[in-house]
Amino acid sequence: MQQRKLGAEGPLVGAIALGCMSFGGSYGETDEAESHRTLARALEFGVDHLDTSNIYGDGRAEEVIGSFIKGRPHRFRIATKGGIKRGPPSGFDNSPEYLRECLEGSLRRLGSEHVDLYYIHRRDQRIPIEDVVGTLVRFKEEGKIGSIGFSEISPASLERACQVHPVAAVQSEYSLWTRLPELGLVQATGRLGAALVAFSPLARGMLSDRMPDPVRFGDKDFRRATPRFAEPNFGYNKERVARFNAYARGKGHPPSALALAWVLARAPHIIPIPGTRSPQHLEQDAAGAGIVLTPKDMEEIEAILPVGFAHGARYSDQQNIGPEGYC
């Protein structure tokens, strides 16, 4: 697999990474054995960067990774996150004390003394981002983390953070149906030497062989409350995405592979992290790193799914608390 740098000073990792949110049951019931098979296949395909969080399944996703790597050599570069409080009361806490508590818990579940990349999952607006970076620098000096990252911050916040210490990665939703990062974050991360780690690059399962059916969503499925999966929005989105999926198959590619190839083609510092706990789906995703899109291909894809095509917001009002707005 082609490789990309996880930040200007960071290691090379596979151009396509693995998001591990589903290991914690966020998209339905999960099976540890199947998750372990997925991790084993990831190494075979060169998918060597794992992304997780302390809140995915209340730590379950980290435990699954930890039980897989325990007692065996591996090549994974692991990223996790902290800073969200599930409560009650829920909210965000970027204080040094709480971030240390989050980090220590993650390391314990992973069975490690060090994590390669540590993100602030959501910014606590009560604390200047410069002070938060200072806390992360101390963790780095202690050898507990390799590099610093932020999730869902604005380009302006990234500029401020980088004045204190280099930021290796910024995580943001980016796909054919969520293109907000093109209004500044793609450019800022490239200029400042940070990787743009694109989560939900497959539109939460829409850009795949089997589009999800909202009727079948379980009670814990994150998408149940998402406007794009509620009618009438979902009907419009399904019809439009079906055209792209048919186009991909006509080109001889799984829709997921072509969608990931599109993300990779947008800029050389973007690393998509599709999430799956299925070895079969992972194989299709990994194939995206081998697809080279021509300018004509990009024009045809844009005609099928033009910027702004998606009906409905990517988050409900309740879900949208935390990501920083810009533009």
Image (cartoon, rainbow, N blue to C red):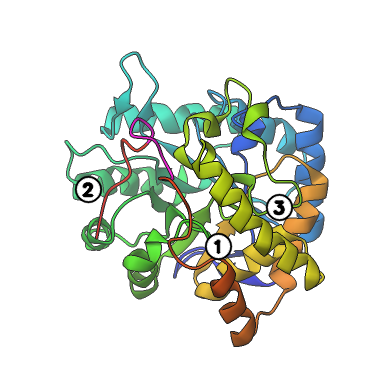
**Residue range highlighted in magenta:** 314-319
- Residue at far bottom of view: 295
Residue lying at 34% horizontally and 75% vertically, measured from the top left: 191
For the N terminus, the quadrant is bottom right
Q: Secondary structure at mark 1?
A: strand
Magenta stretch: dominant secondary structure: loop
Split into 4 quadrants, where in the image is the C terminus? bottom left
- Asked whether 318 falls inside the magenta stretch, the response is yes
Q: Amino acid at mark 1?
A: Ile
Report the mark closest to the observer, 1 or 3: 3
Residues marked 2 and 3 touching at CB (< 8 Å): no
Disc on res. 129: 2
Give the residue type that dot 2 points to.
Ile
Counting labels gives 3
Q: CA distance from mark 2 to mark 3?
A: 37 Å
**Nearer the N terminus, badge 1 or badge 3?**
3
Residue at numbered disc 1:
271
55 to 291, vertically: above or below: above
Q: Closest to the observer: 227 or 43? A: 227
Q: Nearer the viewer, residue 147 or 199?
A: 199
Residue 128 lies left or right of residue 274; in this view the side is left
Q: CA distance from mark 2 to mark 1?
A: 24 Å
Residue 208: which disc?
3
Picture quadrant of residue 81: top left
Residue 256 in the image: x percent, y percent?
Answer: 70, 58
- Residue 292 in the image: state x and y as whole percent: 69, 79
Q: Residue at x 40, y 21 (%)?
A: 86
Q: Within the magenta stretch, is there residue 113? A: no
Across and down, in percent, residue 135 comes to 29, 42
